[in-house]
Amino acid sequence: MAGKEKMLITGGNPLQGVVHVSGGKNTSVAVIPATLLCDEPCTIENLPDIQDVYALVDILRVLGAKVDYVPGEFMKVDPRPAEGWQVDYRNAQRLRASYYLIGVLLGRMGRAEVAFPGGCKIGTRPIDQHLKGFNALGAQTEERGGVIFAEADRLVGRDVFFDMVTVGGTINVMLAACKAEGTTVLHNAAKEPHIVDLANFLNSMGAKVKGAGTDVIRIKGTPYLHGSTYAVIPDQIETGTLMIAAAATRGDVVISGCIPTHMEALSAKLLEMGVRVNDSDDAIRVRMMGAHRAVNVKTQVYPGFPTDLQQPMSALLTTAHGRSMIEETLFEFRFKHVDELVRMGAQIRVVERTAIIEGVPSLYGAPVTTTDLRAGAALLVAGLMAQGETEIYEPEYIDRGYEHIEDKLRALGAQIRRESID
């Protein structure tokens, strides 16, 4: 992106129409590194056109892979020329998911040197469970000078018991285990949809992964993985953000190309608020009928309410009738957007990991600053709700996870644009 920009939203317009969901960010940032485990070229389809994908393209090319990427169409990866095992600080800092290269490079090369990952600063996000899993498979790991070093003469399948449910740890150890000798069993594994999708991609290449979507995943190591063409699933969090935006603007929106069963926790809360939610095989219609009612939300691992939707949901609740409470159980710094919502007229106070929201009649436009990806989504929702004009600074955070979000919102009737900052 050339230069600094700000996003300008004139709120108060109900969103109306049909919008299509892009491919899943959280799936894509796992599937793209996983192509390095293959022994033949792979083609990935339905990737979102977002900054995290571009960062991974650059990393794969630095490692020596041949990557042909046409945004909106396909990505072809030929991993055969890749001989690198180092991901430097500058590239690793561009996204959180750069740590998946540790598991992938261990599986492919038997060694990895990956700088600590970047991503949004939303709280403590340790990788000790990742390293515990690698160690169980026979790798030696060390953290030194901001770099994670991992090496193994051979990886051997073992039982891995996670001390806590960890999405990143489940994915990372699963990637390494695909090339380990024997069978690896992951206990207390995470169940998120993108874990299931990654397992399906690996199996499409000939891997043997069973149990994804449950808390026990079994991976039988496979020495050779063949090429595959695979389309990633639609983005669960983009779907939820669009559902919340439709409700927040008292609109009538059909979100197409989604998976309604992934959205059940959010749909239940919207229904509790008085929003009408109807779904079909691959679409969800969200309509506003009457006033919003306050609700209580507690973030949980899947299939509970997603932490990635907590921030947009808090924006919606600022004008709900009554008192709402949101308890954030996963990331302690995921209320940094609250100060910006208060600037727009919200009445919110945070006590430890709970935000207490007193509904107000309306929000009003103000200059606000994005601090992380989902905080940006919250400010988008708030700007669409607010009276007057909202200026959102640092919108590049939003670009990390939402494909052409302004175009999609404009097509639904939103007044939204970007301007360069002198």
Image (cartoon, rainbow, N blue to C red):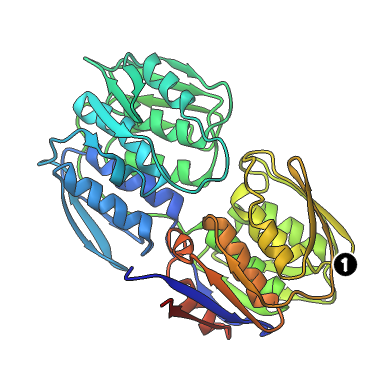
Name the residue rendered at 72%, 82% in the picture.
387
Figure quadrant of the C terminus? bottom left
Name the residue rendered at 26%, 62% in the picture.
74
The answer to whether residue 13 is above or below residue 129 is: below
Figure quadrant of the N terminus? bottom left
- How many numbered marks have been drawn onto this rendered protein structure? 1
Name the residue rendered at 55%, 56% in the picture.
371
| Horizontal and vertical percent position of residue 217 | 47, 28
User: Is residue 308 visible from the viewing direction of this image?
Assistant: yes
The answer to whether residue 126 is above or below residue 192 is: above
Q: Which residue is mark 1?
A: 321
- Picture quarter containing residue 246? bottom right
Residue most toward the left? 81
Residue most toward the right? 322
Q: Residues within 10 Å of mark 1 (few under 14, many from 20)?
A: some
Left of 61 or right of it: where is 137?
right
| Horizontal and vertical percent position of residue 101 | 31, 37
Tag 1: amino acid? His
Left of 401 or right of it: where is 332?
right
Relative depth, front residue between 161 and 379:
379
| Horizontal and vertical percent position of residue 97 | 40, 43
Left of 288 or right of it: where is 152?
left
Left of 279 or right of it: where is 82?
left
| Horizontal and vertical percent position of residue 253 | 62, 77
User: Is residue 200 visible from the viewing direction of this image?
Assistant: no
- Picture quarter containing residue 184? top left
Name the residue rendered at 32%, 31% in the picture.
102
The answer to whether residue 24 is above or below residue 365 is: above
The answer to whether residue 191 is above or below residue 154 is: below
Q: Secondary structure at mark 1?
A: loop
